[in-house]
Image (spheres, rainbow, N blue to C red):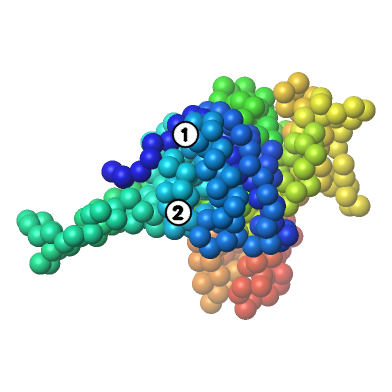
């Protein structure tokens, strides 16, 4: 479709250090991403700048250095550890005479390799099309002449306009199919709410060990590997918790610093498993020297998808790689679990983790019995809309006796949202 240089497996990596902390990337993470994509890094070009240059992102001298490295090593592709504008990619390709990929394009390529389910493939294609839509002009400079004919708009349109229109139509078609999948997921969530089955969602930085932990807790065989973005498609399994009963454990895609917005938008249906969870298990690779920065990046993504208010239980994973660290539970001043130290690979501390999950879920739920007078029937309707009514009956005086069960956070939000003193309707059983 595109008049572009073909990407290959021999790559020159480019990493630039910026003074701005928000623009900094990690070179080791780039190398892991490249390895996960199945690409061989044959050289690394580094440098430093205050701000990106408009034409080549790097200075003209550094751009020539990159081009010389490509020619000397016969590289097939140049991969930047940063986000490039369409014009910067085009200028660099003309200079280097090979394919140029930025960080976003590399992550999209990995996602396209990992997608296994129909939904996952649709989500990846949607993200790729949104990314490509801003870069169409680069490959079509020789096709700007207008043409007419059956099925083409108006007196004529350029080839570029035709492809933009076809791409937009494909995006709409994929979005319609994903909306259908989202509705199916929503039906499943509503069924779980009605059945009072809580959802526990695994979140964390990519390659933190979420899938290995998922397999250990559920006796499943979800694909797990020591590479970035080994998991792409969400997986749900039922687990049994003492004093809680059945619960749903969800394994989700890993997060990464500066996660492309196209991916967040495309994976909206998947991320809803996180947004609608009762408890988040924030899995952290504590053997990683950058675990603090990774925790911050995950929390930023959770805030972006509006899941930062959900209770978190931090799971400190891979203690088998650390000296003098044993499986244990850390608690706050009130005695509630806040961290659990485990090794998912070795199965250490899994029983402690299950106990901690049980304590957190039990704490999150509130149960109340309310007597609602007939003139407050709208309040009964609110509870029905929230799918939180466990049972109801009529009192002798004609009031509704409603037993509700919901998360503490939902109860607190309801109190703030409605102009009714809910506490005055609560009765002791």
Q: Is residue 391 left or right of residue 352?
A: left
Could you tell me if residue 135 is visible in this image?
yes
Q: Position of residue 142 (x, y in %)?
A: 25, 53
Residue named by callout 2: 91
In the rendered view of the protein, which quadrant contains the N terminus?
top left
From the viewer's perspective, is residue 282 above or below residue 32? below
Tell me where residue 213 appears, x and y as whole percent: 68, 30
Instruction: State the residue in front, 329 or 71.
Output: 71
Is label 1 in a helix, a strand or a loop? loop
For label 2, the SS is helix
Q: Rounded to the nearest whole Å, what is the CA distance between mark 1 and mark 2?
A: 16 Å
Residue 120 lies in quadrant:
top left
Residue 419 point in image, percent of width and height: 62, 78
Earlier in the chain: of badge 1 and badge 2, it is 1
Query: Quick check: 203 above or below 306?
Result: above
Task: Decide: few, some or many residues near mark 2? Use Cα within 10 Å; few <14, some 14-19, many ≥20.
Answer: some
Whether residue 37 is visible, yes or no, is: no
- Judging depth in this view, the residue of 50 and 187 nearest the camera is 50
Q: Residue at left 10%, top 67%?
A: 155
Instruction: Farthest residue to the left: give it.
Output: 150
* Quadrant of the image occupied by residue 231: top right
281 on left or right of 348: left
What's the mark number on residue 76? 1
Residue at the spot 87% in from the left edge and 33% down from the top edge: 328
């Amino acid at each position: 479709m595109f008049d572009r240089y073909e990407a290959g497996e021999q790559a020159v990596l480019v990493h630039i250090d910026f003074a701005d902390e928000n623009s900094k990337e990690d070179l080791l993470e780039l190398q892991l991403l490249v390895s996960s994509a199945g690409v061989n890094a044959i050289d690394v070009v580094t440098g430093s700048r205050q701000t990106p240059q408009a034409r080549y992102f790097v200075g003209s001298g550094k751009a020539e250095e990159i081009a010389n490295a490509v020619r000397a090593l016969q590289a097939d592709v140049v991969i930047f550890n940063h986000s490039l504008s369409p014009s910067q990619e085009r200028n660099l390709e003309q200079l280097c005479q090979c394919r140029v990929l930025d960080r976003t394009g590399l992550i999209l390529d990995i996602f396209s390799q990992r997608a296994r389910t129909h939904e996952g493939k649709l989500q990846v294609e949607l993200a790729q099309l949104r990314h490509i839509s801003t870069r169409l002009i680069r490959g079509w400079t020789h096709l700007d002449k207008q043409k007419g004919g059956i099925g083409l708009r108006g007196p004529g349109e350029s080839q570029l306009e035709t492809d933009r229109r076809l791409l937009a139509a494909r995006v709409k078609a994929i979005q319609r199919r994903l909306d259908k999948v989202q509705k199916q997921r929503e039906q499943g969530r509503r069924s779980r709410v009605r059945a009072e089955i809580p959802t526990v969602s695994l979140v964390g930085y990519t390659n933190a060990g979420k899938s290995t932990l998922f397999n250990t807790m559920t006796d499943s065989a979800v694909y797990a590997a020591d590479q970035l973005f080994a998991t792409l498609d969400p997986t749900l399994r039922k687990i049994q918790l003492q004093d809680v009963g059945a619960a749903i454990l969800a394994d989700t895609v890993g997060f990464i610093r500066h996660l492309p917005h196209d991916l967040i938008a495309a994976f909206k249906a998947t991320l809803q498993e996180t947004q609608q969870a009762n408890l988040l298990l924030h899995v952290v690779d504590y053997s990683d020297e950058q675990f603090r920065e990774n925790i911050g990046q995950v929390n930023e993504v959770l805030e972006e998808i509006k899941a930062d208010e959900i209770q978190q239980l931090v799971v400190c994973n891979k203690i088998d790689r650390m000296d003098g660290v044993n499986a244990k539970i850390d608690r706050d001043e009130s005695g509630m679990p806040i961290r659990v130290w485990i090794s998912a690979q070795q199965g250490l501390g899994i029983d402690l983790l299950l106990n901690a999950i049980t304590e957190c879920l039990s704490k999150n739920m509130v149960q109340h019995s309310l007597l609602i007078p007939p003139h407050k029937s709208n309040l009964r309707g609110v509870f029905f809309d929230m799918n939180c009514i466990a049972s109801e009956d009529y009192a002798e005086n004609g009031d509704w006796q409603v037993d509700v069960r919901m998360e503490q956070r939902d109860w607190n939000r309801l109190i703030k949202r409605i102009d009714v003193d809910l506490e005055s309707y609560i009765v002791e059983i």
